[in-house]
DNA sequence: TTTTGAGTTGTTCGA
DNA sequence: GTCGAACAACTCAAA
């Protein structure tokens, strides 16, 4: 029997720049690609919105692999058992994958690798999903960086590996098995109106961004009604595109068009934040559970199911907060600026544990990422690395005036306030009665009164942080 | 080993 | 309305 190579894909659902897939297709014999809907302990299952994305991404991948004549299988269960079974059934002689970085994930992978080696199966794992492997970058004292700027300066000096091309066609073709464990969530229809999923869409998004939008990125990225951000985050989340591909494509544009270089540098620094988060995930213990600054372990978070529910459902009475939370629910994403605002409101004004916000984002975001999501929540909450100083508490009214001055973002997502003039759009509870009635707004009826006093809660947050 | 400069994204207050 | 200072001190990273 000919030898068979098995590629286990996880968060690397692409053909190009996929070292595991390239390694398999270089070998003599058949290549099988496997995705496992994992039930392993220590591997965080995707949230509901991400699961929708995943399903569509797997379908796109299946079509792409079929074009190469490579068999693709999706299974559900314990990866150790499934891989052992496939190795036995398909006469697999080599197994390849690209690395992942959470402690639980590494434990699963290490155990599987050990079992494969002991049964004489070749295995190899590759770096493919970060720019620089976490163990390949350290401070002069050989410690992991905990401040972003020196991390970024060092990263920039590094040669980033050139992306690999798509592999050549395989040699066999069988009927692929689709993902039949997937159940369409109720919100699938609305999510599907907002996104194109898959490797081809990821490449188009990158090209469009670099061609048309990156110039406006440094200025425009803070304005939630501007389409100035790249839109790449869910593609990166599932590895439909690799950070190295982005790095080199962007660097090429910077070389050809020097006037774009500064904007591209800013964009790539944001990509480096993703690596910074992955390096935290690798070096620190469970960043979705444990505060990275130990003193935050003693923080006395408020318990309020009502406040949490109002925040989740976009009914806080604070327009830009509600706009963001409703955008999240409708589209599976939220503009970065607004993510900071809603996270600051939850963790500072409402003094609710960042983990609860992190979990809600994980459930609702199509780009909910095992590294970026917890690292960023900790950053806002103050317990993260290079975190916001405790006195940095966003005021949703001030921020609304600054970044949504004409109100188009709030009017889109909070239509019950659409008729209010700009002046009162971000603080309707302070508007004169005649302005409210002219706009058809009744605070407490058509739109909630604010669930928290911004000034008093700011003081409370400052005191709670100072007490640490 | 010690020193030094610096650190993603803010708000408020008072002059 | 505009502007600078205060909000704290700490830790990091490199010289």
Image: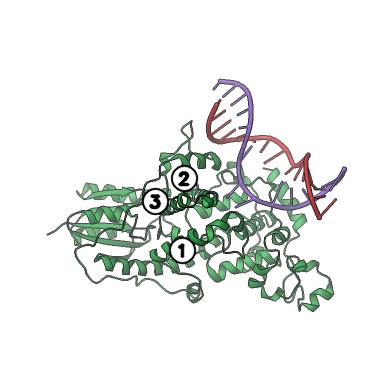
Chain colours: A green, B purple, C red
Report the residue marked by disc 1.
A205
The residue pinned by badge 2 equals A279
Q: Are marks 2 and 1 in contact (CB under 8 Å)?
A: no
Query: Is residue A38 or residue A247 the one in the foreground?
Result: A247
**Residue A59 x/y as whole percent:** 36, 70
Indicate the chain on which mark 3 is placed. Answer: A
Q: Chain of mark 1?
A: A
Whether residue A233 is visible, yes or no, is yes
Q: Position of residue A419 (x, y in %)?
A: 73, 76
Q: Nearer the viewer, residue A373 or A411?
A: A411
How many dots with numbers?
Answer: 3
Please identify, in this view, whether the residue under mark 3 or under mark 1 is nearer the observer.
Answer: 1
Question: As displayed, is residue A318 above or below residue B9?
Answer: below
Q: Give the position of the C terminus of chain A as an image quadrant.
A: top right
* A155 w.r.t. A225: above or below: above
Earlier-in-chain disc, 2 versus 3: 3
Q: Decide: marks 2, 3 in contact (CB < 8 A)?
A: no
Left or right: where A399 falls relative to A228: right
Q: In terms of secondary structure, where does tag 1 sit?
A: helix
Instruction: Say whether mark 1 and mark 3 are on the same chain.
Output: yes
SS under mark 3: loop
Could you give the CA–CA distance between mark 3 and mark 1, rounded to whole angstroms? 24 Å
Secondary structure of the residue carrying tag 2 is helix
Q: Which mark is residue A248?
A: none
Q: Quadrant of residue A432?
A: bottom right
Q: Would you name the residue on which mark 3 appears?
A: A100
Q: Is residue A306 visible to us here?
A: no
Q: Dot 3, how many residues are within 10 Å of its Cα: few (below 14), some (14-19), or many (20+)?
A: many
């Amino acid at each position: 029997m000919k030898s068979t190579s098995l590629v286990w894909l996880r968060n690397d659902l692409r053909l190009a720049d996929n070292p595991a897939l390239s390694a398999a297709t270089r070998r003599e014999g058949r290549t099988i690609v496997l995705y496992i809907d994992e039930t392993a302990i220590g591997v965080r299952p995707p949230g509901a919105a991400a699961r929708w994305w995943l399903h569509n991404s797997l379908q796109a991948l299946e079509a792409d692999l079929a074009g190469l004549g490579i068999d693709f299988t999706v299974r559900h269960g314990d990866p150790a058992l499934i891989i052992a079974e496939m190795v036995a059934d398909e006469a697999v002689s080599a197994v390849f994958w690209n690395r992942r970085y959470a402690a639980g994930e590494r434990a699963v992978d290490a155990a599987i690798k050990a079992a494969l080696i002991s049964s004489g199966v070749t295995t190899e794992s590759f770096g493919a999903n970060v720019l620089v492997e976490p163990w390949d970058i350290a401070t002069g004292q050989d410690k992991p960086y905990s401040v972003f700027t020196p991390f970024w300066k060092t990263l920039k000096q590094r040669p980033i590996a050139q992306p690999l091309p798509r592999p050549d066609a395989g040699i066999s073709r069988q009927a692929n098995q689709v993902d039949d464990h997937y159940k369409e969530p109720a919100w699938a229809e609305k999510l599907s109106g907002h996104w194109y999923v898959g490797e081809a869409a990821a490449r188009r998004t990158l090209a469009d961004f670099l061609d048309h939008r990156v110039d406006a990125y440094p200025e425009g990225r803070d304005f939630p009604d501007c389409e100035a951000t790249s839109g790449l985050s869910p593609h990166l989340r599932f590895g439909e595109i690799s950070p190295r591909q982005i790095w080199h494509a962007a660097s090429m544009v910077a070389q050809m068009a020097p006037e774009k270089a500064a904007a591209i540098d800013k964009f790539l620094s944001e990509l480096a934040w993703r690596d910074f988060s992955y390096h935290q995930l690798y070096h620190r213990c469970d960043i979705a559970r444990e505060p990275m600054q130990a003193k935050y372990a003693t923080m006395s978070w408020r318990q309020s199911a009502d406040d949490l529910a109002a925040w989740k459902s976009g009914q806080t009475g604070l327009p830009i907060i509600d706009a963001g939370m409703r955008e999240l629910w409708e589209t599976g994403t939220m503009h970065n600026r607004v993510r900071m605002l809603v996270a600051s409101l939850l963790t500072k004004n409402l003094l609710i544990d960042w983990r609860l916000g992190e979990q809600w984002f994980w459930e609702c975001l199509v780009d909910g990422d095992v590294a970026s999501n917890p690292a960023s929540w900790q950053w806002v909450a103050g317990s993260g690395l290079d975190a916001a100083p405790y006195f940095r508490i966003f005021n949703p009214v001030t921020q609304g005036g600054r970044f949504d001055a004409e109100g188009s973002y709030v009017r889109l997502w909070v239509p019950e306030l659409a008729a209010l003039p700009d002046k009162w759009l971000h603080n309707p509870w302070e508007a004169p009665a005649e302005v409210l009635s002219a706009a058809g707004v009744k605070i407490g009826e058509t739109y909630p009164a604010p669930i928290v006093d911004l000034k008093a809660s700011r003081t409370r947050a400052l005191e709670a942080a100072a007490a640490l």
